[in-house]
Amino acid sequence: MCKRRTFYITTPIYYPSNKLHIGNSYTTVAADAIARFKRALGYDVWFLTGTDEHGQKIQRQAALAGKPAQEFVDEIVCWIKDLWRVLDIDHDDFIRTTEPRHKQKVAKIFNRFYEQGDIYKGQYRGWYCTPCESYWQERELQDGTCPDCGRPVELVTEECYFFRMSRYAPRLLKYIETHPEFIQPASRKNEMVNNFLRPGLEDLSVSRTSFDWGIPVPFDQKHVIYVWLDALSNYLTALNYGEADSLMDRFWPADVHLIGKDILRFHTIYWPIFLMALDLPLPRTVFGHGWLLLEEGKMSKSKGNVVDPLVLVDRYGSDAVRYFLLREIPFGADGTFSIEALVSRINTDLANDLGNLVSRTLTMAERYFKGLLPAPVQAGPGDDQLIQLALETPRLMEEAMERLQISDALAILWKLVNRSNKYIDENSPWELARHPEQQGRLQTVIYNLVESIRFTAVMVGPFMPRTPGRIWEQIKMGHQKELHSWDSLQSWGQLKPGTKIVRGEDLFPRRNLPEELAWSRPEVTVTGKAAAPSPKADTRQQGLITLEQLRQVDLRVARIIDAVRVPGTDKLLEVKVDLGENGQRRVVAGLARHYRPEQLTGLQVLFVANLQPVKLRGILSEGMLLAAVDDGGRLALTTVDQPVTPGCKIS
Ligand code: MSP
């Protein structure tokens, strides 16, 4: 038996630290379209997505929400799975890094690295960006901040395990040079080689001791495995790596790791080196797509200016949102999301071009032929051109998709849609209908148009999975399921005359831009850091909390008794506070760059008293001092304007 060609595609696994936004959805929608396209072509496809649930950032977010870390991520993962359902993401597996199937295998991988001498114990001193979970050397910082996100970094010194990157760097460099398809788009290759590989790759710190939300190092339990080593391994653990007869045999190496350009360094430097150390072949392509920006700049979960995909789908439907994301931005480049651009795509491409083609054609089929597809009997001008274009469109789309140029593939398909619309205008069926002797020609024109719509419906399916079904409801092909397949596009004229046609409602109603703009202002952009979502929460209420939720935060006035610097960092102070009848607490706060310890003693400050304790630099921090931070990075503690009893409640 001939084995089907396989295709393994992955998305990044997302941090469930907050709800996902339209930018993250972009990666997953693109991966889904590619996976569906390959399935349509007959490939044996495995499409993996999931969540990256460990690390300091998640632990801190959970603490802020006052929840145990596992409970915190469980809720958000539930929300993410729901989002993928709503966006019609048809993944074959969803991996969570907190699942035993993943944790056990990552521990084994770490062990193997240690046993073969790739990992050794040492002292780490460097700068850590918590939101990005990445370490930087002094020379890599930009104006003292994280070069990826521009936010402050912390100086950390701690015992940790290192991975000998230097051992594999020359092999990787050679591999990149000899495999032009490995880093895509090609322009990103030089960036990786010149910025990271050529200057000499430093050994990577692959364990942490300052928090414990992670996979313990199997032979030294006070360390947890660095979250990126943990996360990258998901691409293997989800295939049951290390087990006999696993999916590894069928699908490894991956064909495409689809990621955003910001995490290219992890996927094209560290990941291939880990794979070399495991003696595994490297993925064929790592594709780093561009950013989906807002007009005012970058969208980011931690900045809190995000566009909520659920709100958009709720209003426009998932196919329209998917179409916009896939068509608007040349895949690989940055693009901008705006309601104007979305409405313009809906009105022009979907309502005018595709929607009108279907409604005009099917209305005429009903009117002139009582809803039964006529037989083509009389060829005429323009037929060959239309038929030729329809027959070569699948191949042209395949070529574009092979290069992962999704937007180009859709542009190619729309040429057929527009050619079909032009064919209507050129042949003016309403004129033909007025002359009985033109009946044969009219039959052919309508037949060709309906067949062209069938071609279009099949080809649009991977990108807009609901649209073909809505067209099949109107062209009733009954049992002829084979006519839904990509294979059926090899020859023209397979649709059977006599097929019933029932015109339905418009596929994509036109939108009124001013109305959409008026709607979008309060609805679309969620400003301010949202709290952990309740899966049941009404999507329109995002960003708002109820009085009950507010009351869950135990806010009190605390008097600062003492403050000292935390050794090994220039950012943190250890602060002791008095909460009156509620006793005394210790907290670790990022105040050292803003206050000298002695300035703090005696201040009465606002304090969150029911925050889950976390260990920061080995010190248990039990609560949080509230402070205001302005755009210029100035920080001011919030105090009360006259003395009150320490520990009193704020309401
Ligand atoms: N957990 C890591 C990935 C580990 S993969 C082994 C991570 N997670 S993330 O949730 O922060 O981001 C996931 C993906 O979303 C990244 O590919 C990132 O580039 C992408 N995007 C986040 N914001 C984006 C936009 N505004 N636009 C496009 N993609 C963006 O990184």
Image (cartoon, grey):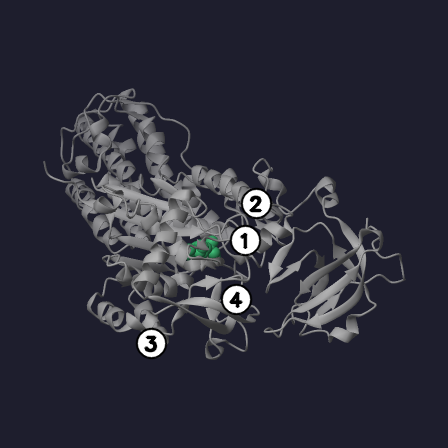
- Residue type at mark 2 is Phe
Rounded to the nearest whole Å, what is the CA distance between mark 1 and mark 2? 9 Å
Q: Residues within 10 Å of mark 2 (few under 14, many from 20)?
A: many
Q: Which residue position holds label 1? A: 58
Rounded to the nearest whole Å, what is the CA distance between mark 3 and mark 2? 40 Å
Report if the CB atoms under discs 1 and 2 are less than 8 Å apart. yes
Q: Which mark is residue 72?
A: 2
Residue 43 seen in render: yes
In the rendered image, the vertical position of residue 227 relative to residue 635, given as above or below: above
Sequence-earlier tag: 4 or 1: 1
Mark 3 vs mark 4: in front: 4
Rounded to the nearest whole Å, what is the CA distance between mark 3 and mark 1? 32 Å
- Residue type at mark 3 is Asn
Q: Please name the residue shown 13% across and 35% down the image.
A: 379
Rounded to the nearest whole Å, what is the CA distance between mark 2 and mark 4? 22 Å
- Count the numbered circles shown: 4
- Residue type at mark 4 is Cys
